[in-house]
Amino acid sequence: MFLVAGITVASAQVKLSFNPEKGTKYEYRSELVQNTVMFVGQDFEMVTEMQVTYLMEIKDKTPEETQVQFTYREVAFKISSSMMNMGYDSKKPDDKMFSNMIGKSFVVVLAPDGSLKSLTGIDEIAGSLNSNLIAGDPMGEQMKQQFSGASLKNTFEQAFRIYPPNAVKEGDSWNAEFVMSVAPMKSNTKTKYTLKEINGNMATVNVASDIVMNASGEMEGRISGTQSGPMQIDIPTGIPVLSEMTQKLKGTITAQGFEIDMDMNNKVKTAISISK
């Protein structure tokens, strides 16, 4: 009897799609730790840490699409190197760089397969950043780029365009490709998803990606590597409640006549839970 039950569970098929209930509110938290070693005559190491927390509200839903509003709750980052240390934390009242973003919202419309149909409202938010702290500051400009429409579109595409086209069982795999162009890099990510386990209403999916980034504009060169890690998906709603990815990237970039060897090790974690 136990053997039969085990075979039944292992062969069960599930349909995974973006299917949260209208009116539901979630807390969406993303964390990035990026360790970059650059060689330009000597090693230069830089560590970037970033945390962003949104209120994620399911505003409307039809069979064809779901309207999701994201509101910035908290933003924090820290950049550390031998040449500089800087940071920001929206929970500290004296930090003003991104304070204009807190409480502001943008809207993402997603199809059942997780593909992004539209993103509205983010340009207005990016334009509201404190210009006195951003203008002329290369690091500030880099952080501003992180919150651009193109960057967020890529973030949410990779967060939600994760579902298979058909019902799947344990051991089944499916593929997706993500193409992004945010100056000065153009990236292509080819991802294979494999359903590892079904446990009650939770599906565990293994993620394995090949990443290629080509420099553009005044820069030349290429960075490539891999991304891997587990993802847990709530089967009834399709919400990816936890994703923990490790990225390993290497390459060489030429900029302003200098050849820069780069070695990057990144940890990317996303957690989505019912909002209190």
Image: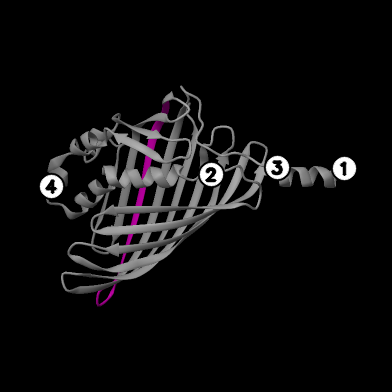
The mark closer to the camera, 2 or 4, is: 2
* Residue 125 versus residue 179 in the image, above or below: above
Question: Which stretch did the figure color magenta?
Answer: 39-58
Residue closer to the observer: 216 or 140: 216
Residue 81 visible, this angle: yes
Q: Which residue is mark 4?
A: 135
Mark 2: secondary structure: loop
Spatial CA span between label 1 and label 3: 17 Å
Along the horizontal axis of the image, is 151 left or right of 32?
left
Label 4 crowd bin: few (<14), some (14–19), many (20+), radius 10 Å: few
Image x and y of residue 71, in percent = 34, 31
**Mark linked to residue 12:** 3
The mark closer to the camera, 1 or 3, is: 3
Was residue 262 drawn as part of the magenta stretch in this picture?
no
Image x and y of residue 108, in percent = 36, 34
Seen at 28% across and 54% down, the residue is 181
Q: Upstream in the sequence, badge 1 or badge 4?
A: 1
Label 1 crowd bin: few (<14), some (14–19), many (20+), radius 10 Å: few
Spatial CA span between label 3 and label 4: 56 Å
Q: Residue furthest top?
A: 23
User: Quarter of the image holding residue 65?
Assistant: top left
Seen at 27% across and 59% down, the residue is 185
Q: Which residue is mark 2?
A: 165
Along the horizontal axis of the image, is 3 left or right of 174?
right
